[in-house]
Amino acid sequence: MGRLQAIYDKMPICIQNLMTSVSGYQKCRQRYGKAYYERRQFLKTFDELSLEEKLNYQREKLWEFIRFTKKNSTFYQKLYKDINIDELSTIEDLKKLPIVDKEMLRANIEEVYTIPKNLAVESHTGGTTGKSLTVRGIKEDMMYRMATLDHFKARFGFENRKMKRATFNGKHIVPPGQKKKVFWRYNRACKQMIYSSFHITEENLSAYVKSLNSFKPAAIDGFFTSMCDVASFIERNNIKLAFKPIAIFPTSETVTESGRELLTRVFGCEVYDQYASSEGAPFITECVEHRLHTELSTGVFEHFTDGSDEVLVTSFVTRGTPLIRYKIGDCVAFSNNTEICKCGRHDTYITGIQGRRLDYLYTADGAKINAGNVSNIFKNLPNVIIRSQAIQKKLGEITILLEVDKKLYKPKYDEIIRDEFKHKFGNDTEIILRHVDCIPREKSGKFKFIVNEVNTNN
Ligand SMILES: [Zn+2]
């Protein structure tokens, strides 16, 4: 990518659009082959099955996947050497297999792979923990994942690649030093306008909104915080939108209630969240009733019983780098509610996805306050905060960076924020408020609402 990026950076914008589309067409060939279309068809019929039929399918796929893994992965062969897989057949039996964590996977990755590099689709996962991992995938599995994602969107009436989509992501589409205020490139292959997350500033936002208004996307997806920045700007400046998307599909970042309300208010459409990590976890998707369900066709989630809500995932579509009882580091809260959801899907409810473990702050005595709760602190303010970031380096002290709308922000708001924080974190935590012009994004383009640097050594 390095050399291609260097060539790209020197080209005029129209050629960059062309290069974006060419790369889009190449990706499409990888993602939308025969297996993709067959899977889309399968998922439509799968949705119509009874819960019992779905669970049967899940159980069969589970053991088929584990037998495949034991046969093809040296790491799992060694791990399961004293276990007779053929005697196991239920979802409960899964508990008889050992748990795998990130460090085990990283340290043995060459032995975990079931396929050579030249046959694999590689993806890299970075992450909050600082560990990075190259995951090898089988082409067909990649198509299955795309089909699941597109099927999820199609449930609400959005058909990927047939309808226009605006995406806010971390791609470096705008070369450094570009003078023109054009922070987007068009990927014709997917009818997708890609917007840079790195250039969203108060100064540039009106250009973003103008572009959206002329593009008129049928859906918006990508980084949640970027979409919220755009929405907040539209609202604060009373800008009229020339389009109404079918839905908004955030990815990668924690969806907060206040942000969700803002997007719904401004764009006049609903927000539907989904979860699937880059390592290839099974899917959790939000339904039309705004409840979260596991997608039983993609894998198994297990509650990890150590008191936290951390989950173990077993993901059927990770045959290249199999994940079985993998401690992925995310927290998922399962509900005991067994009533059938009005959407017609009757699989397990999820009451919340906490995202990455570091998505929380500590109180002075070490209790965790999660990102959702922290973002609620700003709920009682009018729409005057453009962005905020809470940084914790040690217990008993939290620094809040605030990027505010200077025209609307009043000094008394500082006191309100301080007061709200005190109510959540107690008097033993010192709250330092700092007003800044711009809070930088991560290298990946994601915006971190919470930076927790306590205990980063584990
Ligand atoms: Zn539902």
Image: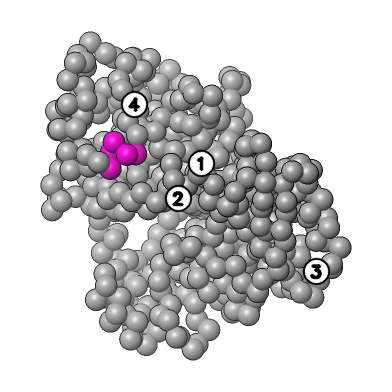
Amino acid carrying label 4: it is Ile
What is the quadrant of residue 108 in the picture? top left
Residue under the point 45% across and 50% down: 128
Residue under the point 44% across and 38% down: 329
- Separation of residues labelled 4 and 3 (CA atoms): 50 Å
Do the numbered discs 2 and 4 sit on residues whose CB atoms are within 8 Å? no
> Dominant secondary structure of the magenta stretch?
helix
Counting other residues with Cα less than 10 Å from the Cα at mark 1, is it few (<14), some (14-19), or many (20 or more)? some
Which element carries disc 3, helix, strand or loop?
A: loop
Q: Earlier in the sequence, mark 4 or mark 3?
A: 4
Residue at the spot of label 4: 99
Amino acid carrying label 3: it is Tyr
Residue at the spot of label 2: 128
Q: Earlier in the sequence, mark 3 or mark 1?
A: 1
Looking at the image, is 444 positioned above or below residue 46? below
- Find the magenta span and give its range: 102-106
Q: In the rendered image, is residue 224 in sight?
A: no
Residue at the spot of label 1: 357
Amino acid carrying label 2: it is Thr
Q: Position of residue 280 (x, y in %)?
A: 35, 42
